[in-house]
Image (cartoon, rainbow, N blue to C red):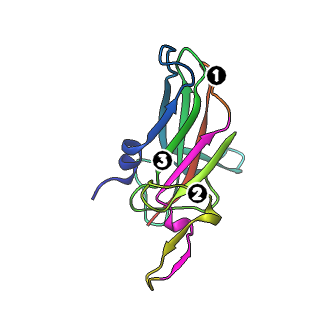
Amino acid sequence: MRNPFTICAAVLTLLCSAAGSWAQEQALVTLQSEVLREVEVVREDGRKDVRLEPAASARPGEVLFFRITYTNEGKGPAENVQLTNPVPEHMVYEGKSAHGEGTDVTFSVDGGRTFGKPEDLTVTGEDGKERPAGPADYTHIRWRLSEPVPMRQGGTVGFRARLR
């Protein structure tokens, strides 16, 4: 059985293009992908804190946090940046958990061929009838950045998913 964490990191993709002529040096956006889990920590005074730590393994039913950090390492602003990440095999997307400041988030239910807003997505049910898609049907998540990413700057996007 393949490790779902390795799958996520291996298939994380970035579609980035820079505006302008071909002679202009294109922006270079680098990515760092992390899979995290919530860990409860008891402080000396007895209060409990929750923090995120790297997830080396997971149990069925456990929720994991997927965080993608992007940075513009190029010599100009990165324009029209899109980050596309599959929901890893053996994982189910946790509804309304995709986040990223200044992004437009869309989802795919067809293996990443097409994307849309949740209210616009449909799938064919086991009965052969079309029905509205739900979070368990999502195969990919796409974040489209609304503004260019300045040189040497970046941000994070992410989502939660539950191990089947």
Which circle's residue, 3 or 1, is located before the other in the chain?
3
Q: Amino acid at mark 3?
A: Asn
Q: Nearer the viewer, mark 2 or mark 3?
A: 2
Which quadrant, please, contains the N terminus? bottom left
Can you say whether 72 is above or below 93 in the image? above
Q: Which residues are magenta?
A: 129-146
Cβ–Cβ under 8 Å for marks 2 and 3 = no
Q: Residue at x 59, y 53 (%)?
A: 106
Q: Any mark on residue 150, and which?
A: 1
Residue 49 vertical position relative to residue 73 in the rendered view, above or below: below
**In the rendered image, which quarter is residue 122 located in?**
bottom right
Q: In the rendered structure, which amino acid carries the disc numbered 2?
A: Gly
Does the magenta segment cover residue 132? yes
Residue in the picture at 71% in, 50% down = 47
Element under disc 1: loop
Sequence-earlier tag: 2 or 1: 2
Q: Position of residue 91 (x, y in %)?
A: 45, 61
Q: SS for tag 3?
A: strand
- The answer to if 22 sits in the magenta stretch is no
Q: Of residues 115 and 58, which is closer to you in this image?
A: 115
Q: Position of residue 117 (x, y in %)?
A: 62, 58
Residue 96: tell me if it is visible: yes
> Neighbour class for label 1 at 10 Å: few (<14), some, many (≥20)?
some
Instruction: Please report the residue visible at 40 percent of the width from the left and 52 percent of the height from the top.
Output: 57
**SS at circle 2:** loop
